Image (tube, coloured by chain):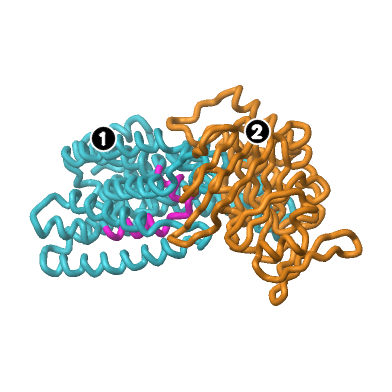
Chain colours: A orange, B cyan
Amino acid sequence: MAVALERASVSLGGQLVWRDASLEVAAGEFVAILGPNGAGKSTLLKALLGVVPLSAGTARVFGRTVRRGNDQVGYLPQRRRFDPDLRIRALDLVRLGLDGDRLGVPLPSRTKEAKVGEMIELVGATAYAGRPIGELSGGEQQRILIAQALVTGARMLMLDEPLESLDLNNQQAISDLIRTICQRHLVTVLLVAHDINPILPFVDRVVYVAGGHVLCGRPEEVIRTETLTRLYGAPVEVLRTSDGRLVVVGQHEPVSYHPVDH
Amino acid sequence: MQGPSWDLVADVQLLLQFHFMQNAFVAGTLVALLAGAAGYFVVLRGQSFAAHMLSQVGFPGAAGAVLVHVAPVFGLVAFCVAAALGIGWVGRNVDAGHRAESAAVGSILAFSLGLGLLFFRLYAGSAAGIYGFLFGTILGISDRDVQLTFVVALLGLGALAIFGRRLVFATVDPDVAEARGVNVRLLSIGFLVIVALSVAITVQIVGTLLIFALLVAPGASALQLTARPVRALALSVLLSLGFTWLGVALAYFSDLPVGFFISTVSFVAYVAIRAVKGASAIRRGNFQLRGAWFAAEA
């Protein structure tokens, strides 16, 4: 099992985020993590990274208890864009993913440079890897960050809203890239999303976080009116638009699956 | 005092003929090494304001030390390190645009200047001591000051050599660094303590008011010229050394204050670099872009 979460609960600042979550993800699966804002989707990733401690239950990644600094796991946090004035090259950022946690003066290393170059090529960022990160577009930055997450030889990618604040073309391009990495390189993907529609065609399973609970299943089992109504504890309706997109609507407050503008 | 002969060897001999000038050069070199190295990180982290605050906090520190009959440098170190721990404790929230940090910095700054005023008044000493403290007293550096500067510079540079890479990681990508097992918070506090130590020894050379000339300007210039971390760090140190040596030499031959020359040389260098970069961006016809200022890779 790539991920095994057993009866896990998380509290932050005395506030229960979700409880009794059980979840199993097989190696090579593509899993989307969905749910309304503030439900604890990012917290789920952080718990699996060992950054946020569990208040109950167990979490294992590749058969071992979660811990920070696991080379087998690559993480792409939710973020705004890099400061345009940040003066460090994109390829330095990838290199930091490889050995940024080490002590001592960084010495030139052919092996490390080759690895960094290989990852940058894999994500198709070779043309602009020598430029300062702040000058790159949102889509370019996202490719660099994926290279950074993969560079330790990660077998799992945890991506927190990687498609947020990208235009439609870039959303398509980045989700295609993530799918390629998942299928061709057999990397397990856990992806937090606001909008399942761009990734729906290739998602194996969906994890839905809402109302303090975590539910897991195939997309057509989970994203249904009855299931989500039970999860939210309030009437919710799942609609399918004429072009096949899924939209979740609450009774009072629409919980739409459109990318939220920030 | 003789003027320069424009023969480099003879001029250097002339410069170093007095013991106080030897001390000035040794202390200046040590300070430039640490301030230049720490300055790269200060500018990369966007902590110029925090560095400014730490330098001002030195004022009540030194004045207080004089009041209780201790060497001013101990008061400097104590106050600067305490203030560093204070801002580090409040923490730095990148998503909030450093708001919490700058508010904390502003509050500590005002309080410390008020304390400085009080200590100065209680001491009722000569204005010369305060003047030297505000603008530097490089020509009055004793052998003991040189020894202390050596120890502090060695500690600071050693810490930066060991933790520098983690610090860059935690600066540009704190969330990923955290997930990779780096203690971002502790590193951030530790760095402020290094800045505090750099400030404490830099004050001797240029004083609290002109400290940016050595702690911020070289790093800012270096980062204009290159986005490669190792190269920018080395360049920052070289610029800082150059500014100090040139400033001390000019002061010696002209009999005008060192602080004036060091700050002027560093300012002119910074403006020249920005102007050259701006001009080359305009030549390429993309001057309307904000990013164009930085487009050329050195």
Q: Residue at x 69, y 34 (%)?
A: A27
Residue A137 is at least partly visible in this image: no
Instruction: Report the front residue among B157 and B141.
Output: B157
- Front-most of A227 and A64? A227
Viewer-proximal residue among A209 and B121: A209
Q: In this view, which residue lies farthest toward the left?
A: B69
Determine crowd level at label 1: few under 14, some 14-19, many 20+ residues with C-alpha closer than 10 A: some
Decide which of B287, A251 is in the foreground and name it.
Answer: A251
Q: Quadrant of residue B101?
A: bottom left
Residue receiving disc 2: A155
Q: Chain of mark 2?
A: A
| Kind of residue sitting beneath label 2 | Arg
User: What residue is shown at x 58% (from left), y 57% (from top)?
Assistant: A40
Q: Answer yes or no: is residue A104 visible.
A: yes
Q: Start and end of the magenta stretch?
A: B38-57
Quadrant of residue A184 within the rendered picture: top right
Write the residue at 70% across / 55% down.
A193
The quadrant holding residue B20 is: top left
Quarter of the image with the C terminus of chain B is top right
Q: Which residue is mark 1?
A: B16
Judged by its main secondary structure, the magenta piece is: helix
Q: Which mark is residue B231?
A: none
What residue is at 58 percent from the left and 37 percent from the top?
A61
Q: Amino acid at mark 1?
A: Leu
Residue occupying the far right of the picture:
A242
Q: Nearer the viewer, mark 1 or mark 2?
A: 2
Task: Please provide percent x and percent y for residue B32.
Answer: 36, 41
What whole-number distance in Å separates the C-alpha atoms at marks 1 and 2? 62 Å
Q: Position of residue B263 (x, y in %)?
A: 39, 53
